[in-house]
Image: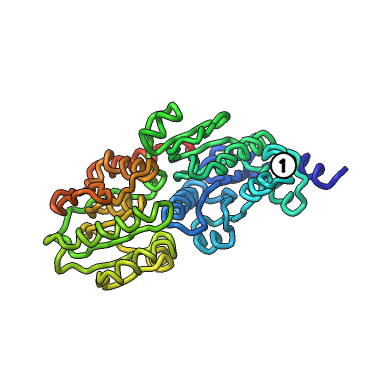
Amino acid sequence: MAFSKFLSRQKPPAPSSAAVADPAHNDLRGDGERIYLVSMASYPNYGDELIARTWLRYLAEVKPAAEVWLDCRHPASASVLFRGDHPHLTTTDTLFRVLDLASQEWEQRSITGIVTDLGSPLFDLQIAEMNRATTLHLLGGGFLNSQWPLNLGLLEGMRASAAVSGARLIATGQGLTPNAGADFDGFAHVSVRDRESAALASLEAGLDDAFLGLPPAGMPLGDVNEVVVCVQSDAIGEDSFQGFLDVVEDALKDPALKHTRLTYVEALPGADYRGYEALSQRGVNFGRFVPFSEFWTAPFRFAPGQFWITSRFHHHLVAASRGARGFALVDSGEYYSTKHGSLIELGSGWLPVHPGETLPAVADTQGQHGFDEAHSQKRREADALYRN
């Protein structure tokens, strides 16, 4: 019998005697469970990392005895980024290697064939470990769309693995625009984070996964004493990038922002540094630059007295939840307008700003209302998946 065929026929290990003796205890603690998370985290980019950390820390609370695997593009990076977030965390790149192999011109097998039959000696052992999961969970984000169509293969790979192991298939906080026809057939639970994605998937609109980790703000608005800026250069056109720089310059002329500290923060290392460099060359004098490494490990202090000018969706989400006001920089594409629009509809109090449009006044922005309930709603979803 070929080694790969032998691996594919192996069964998951039997539950421990403790797991059999007290099933109610195990349901809560996670004994005998292998929870397999699939994520875009590890690049790094703040939003994907925030979502992964949020779920890992939640599982550390409710399933501390479970094995938790995080399948992502860069497992070595993930092992550092999420060190200590769950006591039994293993990072891997299994499913992404499957997608890469299936996309090769010389490869004659499908994603399903590779996951089901193995025959990829370099990482057959990894696939066999994935095929022992009890839950396969696709974490949220905006990666199942026409901008990155190859990512739809994650759904096929997860279905194939579940067919081997009998694992429960779930997906949370998905953003599906621009539409690429994501198919969640076979999934026991799916939630999406915006109204447009809900229409595509014939579901009710849900929330971004990051809301799970955000406690209620409970803080009043304060006077603006810090302006925080982040202008991305990735995933947008050059015209939008230059237009965003113009918006920042114009916004800083608003009397409400005079005599405030200027801070620039990175969400995506390098791609966001370009915005800092360009604005500095235009004469914007930032008091400090916060690289992603510091932003992630410090961690950064979000506060009600801040005013944000950023194109980054998760900056918008987290800063607004802490009471900060801001402008959301939005280009003409469907991707970012949908994301930022979902938060504004929810009650972030921020205003969208498009390049070339008349700039609103800082005084017209408001503090968030509705985000506290969003946290509670997301917590109920997570508890229904992992506590019931």
Q: Residue at x 28, y 67 (%)?
A: 263
Question: Compared with residue 251, is residue 373 higher up or lower down, i.e. above or below?
Answer: above
Question: Compared with residue 143, is residue 201 higher up or lower down, i.e. above or below?
Answer: above
Q: Which residue is drawn at 37% across and 37% down?
A: 194
Q: Residues within 10 Å of mark 1 (few under 14, many from 20)?
A: many
The foreground one among 254 and 172 is 254
Apparent side of residue 251 relative to residue 387 in the rendered image (left or right) = left
Quadrant position of residue 297: bottom left
Q: SS of the residue at dot 1?
A: helix
Residue 148 at x, y = what percent? Answer: 51, 45
Question: Compared with residue 39, is residue 230 higher up or lower down, i.e. above or below?
Answer: below
Apparent side of residue 90 relative to residue 240 in the rendered image (left or right) = right
Q: Mark 1 points at which residue?
A: 114
The foreground one among 61 and 148 is 148
Q: Which amino acid does label 1 sit on?
A: Ile
Residue 103 at x, y = what percent? Answer: 66, 45
